Amino acid sequence: MNTLLIVAGKELREATRNRWVVATTLLMAALALTLSFLGSVPTGTVGVGPVEVTIVSLSSLTIFLLPLIALLLSFDAVVGEIDRGTMTLLLSYPVARWQLLLGKFLGHAAVIALATVVGYGAAGVALAMGNTAIGPESWRAFAAMIGSSVMLGAAFTALGYLASTIVRDRGTAAGIAVAVWLGFVLLYDMALLGILASGSGLGVETLNWLLLANPADAYRLFNLTGFKGVSAFAGTAGLAAHVQLSVPLLLAVMAGWIAAPLALAAALFSRKQI
Amino acid sequence: MTNFTAQVQGVTKRYGETEAVRGVDLTLAPGECVAMVGHNGAGKSSLIKLMLGLTTPTAGSIRVLGGDPASAACSPIRRRIGFLPENVAFHPSMTGRETLDFYARLKGAPCRDNDALFEKVGLEPAAIRRRVSTYSKGMRQRLALAQALLGGPKLLFLDEPTTGLDPALRQSFYAIVAELRDRGTTVLLCSHALTELEGQADRVVVMNRGHKVADGSLATLRSLAQLPVRIRLTLPTGEIDALASRVGEGAALTRLAGGVVELACANDDKVALVRRITCNGPTAPIAVDDIEILQPSLDEMYAHFLRREAAE
């Protein structure tokens, strides 16, 4: 346990030093604040709270941005250290390989969590200081959005670690990371939509499973259908009624998307000949 | 308790098609400084990685400090091993102190001893506070040595420790190694710079293409190699013919620049040969201004063992 914290702490410190933490936090805060200010404009006429508007717009943006940041942060984690020669020295220390991998992951996940919580939290503060009264239900949805965003970031960090462990050079790892992002974030939904539109008679059951097979979709469903106020505004109320995926299941799936790639990466890493 | 710190038995390591290490046996005793020589790709680094447990042998067995270095329960073993890798790299954005503190914590060594270590390897307090990315090659190497010495290791692997260091730094480097060895630490030293190992190593292991081709003290290797001793004579006059007749069949004579003549003879003959040249005999002794006796250097012996290997 102690070893994990030492490794994670070093990773976090390094990310702080090379401005990753500052850059991502500022980016997240800027986006969140922009969207929350935009969201507070139409409230009078539409009849939904500013928080709900912000959640819908912010979570849609998070799906694109956060996986990209997470992959950029993580694709180099293992292969880069092997490349630079720091890995050989680290592994000669009394550290098990899974400890090293998990420790580094915790450090990177902490960077994502910090950036998300501070960045989006700033938007929350801005909303709270606005004139509109905001109910506790809305705040719960907002907190859930931040929490699930951290999970989404962690899931793609784990995928980045897997990419970083599989290959032998950094270029390939970067390529895989980009492919993972394109695949899960952009192409997957397009393909799904295409299949649905072609009227191939995809059952609801199959669709549910296909949505779970992508962490980004699980995140989207969680945020857009998990809370009534949000789904009413997001226009997904109809979908929410059809999709029989409960909130705990969606959370479990996202947790699975963190644990499975990480476990696979750890298994591969411990067998890797450095 | 065993009387060896590391034992390698019949170890072979294959990476795909290539065999990096082939059937190597090696035993390292406490308080011994062993030099491993061989050119690039001879299997030195591969052997060290095997002994560190970074890779597992394809065949054979390795025991280090009483255990298997690649097993899951190797942490107590690794705590007592120091390693200085060939191309040492540190995380550039951390300072010297942070780097050493990080490694000390990983190794479970107290961080308060780090100041003494910095002083030992000669890193200035001002340098310790700076980021590693600003370090020169020599400073990085000092930091690398400091981390290898963390926790007072019983076994120290130094892979090409002195490449890129200036002569003064090399001297202090070897002084630290000698001090450790005297306190019972086993030191395994890899190097290309064979000549600087003379006087440092108790034993020399010659590696070539994954094989161990020779193993023994410098004196043992010398007598094994039976390389000629070279005697250089500076002659005031060109009495080469007279010299040649005195030298006779036992030695080869070469003329060098500046009136210097080099004689190559077997080690056992050298005293007799010098006597034949400089003492009174049937003819007057040959006038000699200067005499210099050259033992075969480690470089030459290394080349000899490689030639023998190639001939086999």
Image (spheres, coloured by chain):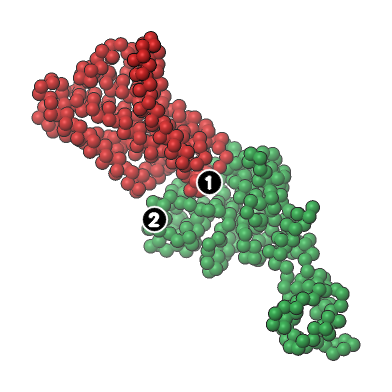
Give coordinates of residue A207: x percent, y percent.
Answer: 37, 14
Which color has been applied to chain B in this rendered view?
A: green
Residue positioned 42% across, 32% down in the render? A179
The residue furthest right is B282
The numbered mark at residue B131 is 2
Label 1: element kind: helix
Picture layout, residue A274 above or below residue B29: above
Q: Could you tell me which secondary element the residue under label 2 belongs to?
A: loop
Mark 1 and mark 2 on one chain: no
Residue positioned 73% across, 53% down in the render: B213
Badge 1 amino acid:
Thr
Which chain's residue wears label 1?
A
Q: Position of residue A53 (x, y in %)?
A: 19, 25
Image location (x, y in percent) of residue A244: 33, 12
Residue shown at 17%/29% (left/top)? A39
- The residue beneath circle 1 is A88
